[in-house]
Amino acid sequence: MTVEETVAVIRGDEDTVVNLKLVRPPATEPFTLAIKRERVETQGIFHHAEIERLLAEHRGRRADHGRNLWALLTFQLWYNTFIAEEL
């Protein structure tokens, strides 16, 4: 499943529902690909360790970072499409 297909499938009215589906199985692969360590470190915009911390807390349900993770994914998709021209 491509990132575009995943986003189309999980798009909904409530951000929290969308975000929970996005970073928890079965839709984790597109998110994981979008935030690969090599890609994030090459861009030099975000700290990959911080992204991993947010994901771990969100997946473990210790905190709701859904909006931040959704913003990160949409930025990465935009960046990959219009700046890096890859995806």
Image (cartoon, grey):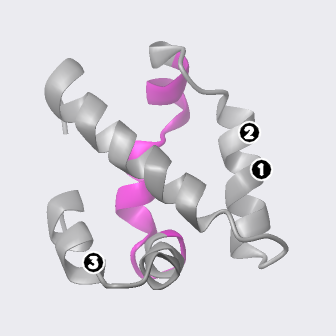
Q: Look at the picture and state if 28 lies above or below 81.
A: below
Drawn side of residue 7 relative to residue 41, left or right: left
Q: Disc 3 marks which amino acid?
A: Arg
Mark 2 and 1 residues: CB-CB less than 8 Å, in contact? yes
Q: Point out the stretch of residues depicted in magenta.
A: 23-41
Please give the name of the residue rendered at 58% of the width and 66% of the height, measured from the top-left corner: 66
Give the secondary structure at mark 1.
helix
Q: Kindly report the distance in space between the C-alpha atoms of the residues bearing marks 2 and 3.
A: 25 Å
Drawn side of residue 20 relative to residue 13, left or right: right
* Pick the front one: 37 or 21: 21
Mark 1 and 3 residues: CB-CB less than 8 Å, in contact? no
Q: Earlier in the sequence, mark 1 or mark 3?
A: 3
Q: Residues within 10 Å of mark 1 (few under 14, many from 20)?
A: few
Drawn side of residue 84 relative to residue 34, left or right: left
Q: Which residue is mark 1?
A: 53
Please give the name of the residue rendered at 25% of the width and 68% of the height, measured from the top-left corner: 7
Residue 66's disc is: none
Q: Kindly report the distance in space between the C-alpha atoms of the residues bearing marks 2 and 1.
A: 5 Å
Q: Look at the picture and state if 64 lies above or below 36.
A: below
In the rendered image, residue 4, in percent from the top left (x then y), is placed at 16, 61
Q: Which residue is mark 3?
A: 11
Q: Main secondary structure of the magenta part?
A: helix
**Was residue 26 drawn as part of the magenta stretch in this picture?**
yes
Residue 50's disc is: 2
Please give the name of the residue rendered at 28% of the width and 43% of the height, measured from the top-left corner: 77
**Was residue 72 drawn as part of the magenta stretch in this picture?**
no
